[in-house]
Image: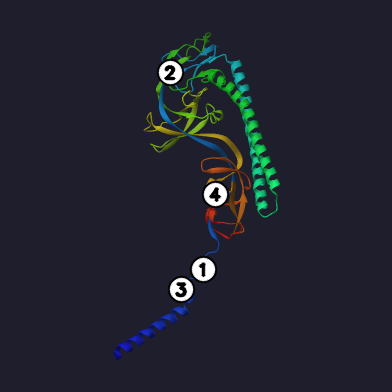
Amino acid sequence: MKEKKIFAALLAGALALSLTACQSGGETSVPTEGDAPAGVAVQVQEVKVDTISTENKVSGRVVTDGQESVFVTAQAQCTAVYVEVGDAVTAGQKLCALDLASTLSSYNAASISYRSAVQSYNDQAAIFDRQIALAEKNVSDLQALFEIGAASQLEIDQAELSLDTARAQRTSTLAQLEAGMQSYKSNVEQLDTVLEHVDGAGNVIAPVSGTVISLSATEGGFVTASAPVAVIDGVDRMEVAVSVSEALVPKLARGDEVDVSISSLGVQVVGTIKSIDLAASMQTKLYNVTVSINEDVAGLLSGMFADVSFRTDTSTNTIVIPTEAILTSNDVQYVFVVENDAARYVEISAGLTGNGVTEVTSGLKAGDMLVTVGQAYLSEGDPVRVVSGEG
């Protein structure tokens, strides 16, 4: 028993020495609250001016198009013939020349009128959108003031009436502008059909590479819409057939470039709008659009699914930020920027949206340091700590 007491005393002494050593070095071995970095950890990105286009994605299928009939849907005199039956031609090669001066002049005038109508529509829509955004903010501000007794219900009612009036005026005015735009577009499309395979000098152009197997054009003779100017037997080409809504079709034009994604092959290529149907399908009420694929894709087969992204409503020299940086509360969109190592709350007005990015029409300027990660944990004035980002 005596030996056990001696052992216990020695053990107690050792523990006391150990505790004394820990206490003497406590400042370095025990972390304190002051050691933690100050501020909310965030990632930032410098706000820059860029170009953005609205993207509309539509799914379709890959199809083949081997033999091409070259039509000019108007009567015109042939002034020169450059090929014969049996000749091998390449896409873009001249087949013959037609006297289409008046038609080309009408097409140019119609194109100018249509572009002007589209610009007027977009400009007016932008004006209304800014007015509505201000009216919405006014209502929101008055509601906040009403909650603290600084505004009356009558003021809120008047602000909401102004907002409803602005929205109704936008709908009415844009409907009228769109009707005019559609009329101009119809004129352009009709002339597009006539000039589908004709360049600006009146030359009929081979749309594909291949062999000329039929040719109706003769020098001094006339071509008509009832028979193709030429038929070209080309190698099989891949195209994508999609159907689009009546809201999207006015924004498309033959020759526009699009992005084509074939998920089964894991590839994305550039395509060109080859044709747009002038009438909607009776069954689906959608408009058929054919997209030519501009490059060879290994393993591409007819029948494969493909997604086509149409780029419309482009804005240039505008503020563009990652969409994920934007927060929303009570229909108010806002972001956080970093100033003097602190978070600043900024309400914004959004414009066009693209692939993961959004146009900001008010609230931000180039050079602002935008919080792109961690913004959900911030409040106005919070200290922040930038852990990574780009300047």
User: Which residue was labeled with disc 2?
Assistant: 232
What amino acid is labelled 1 in the image? Asp
Picture layout, residue 45 above or below residue 56: below
Please tell me how crowded label 4 is: few (under 14), some (14-19), or many (20+) other residues with Cα within 10 Å: many
Sequence-earlier tag: 1 or 4:
1
What amino acid is labelled 2 in the image? Ile
Picture layout, residue 271 above or below residue 157: above
Q: Secondary structure at mark 2?
A: strand
Select label 4 or label 2 by which is in front: 4
Frontmost residue, 227 versus 124: 124
Query: Which x, y percent locates residue 112?
Result: 63, 25
How far is the residue under mark 4 from the one under mark 2?
A: 53 Å
Q: Residue furthest front?
A: 153
User: Which residue was labeled with disc 3?
Assistant: 29
Frontmost residue, 211 versus 37: 37
Q: Are marks 2 and 3 in contact (CB under 8 Å)?
A: no
Please tell me how crowded label 3 is: few (under 14), some (14-19), or many (20+) other residues with Cα within 10 Å: few
How far is the residue under mark 1 from the one under mark 2?
A: 78 Å
Query: Which x, y percent locates residue 285?
Result: 49, 26
340 horizontally vs 37: left or right: right
Sequence-earlier tag: 2 or 3:
3
Select label 4 or label 3 by which is in front: 4
How far is the residue under mark 1 from the one under mark 4?
A: 30 Å
Sequence-earlier tag: 4 or 3:
3
Sequence-earlier tag: 1 or 2:
1
Kindly indicate the quadrant of the structure image that contains residue 293. top left
- Residue at image location 63% in from the left, 22% down from the top: 109
> How many marks do you count on the picture?
4
User: Which residue was labeled with disc 4?
Assistant: 325
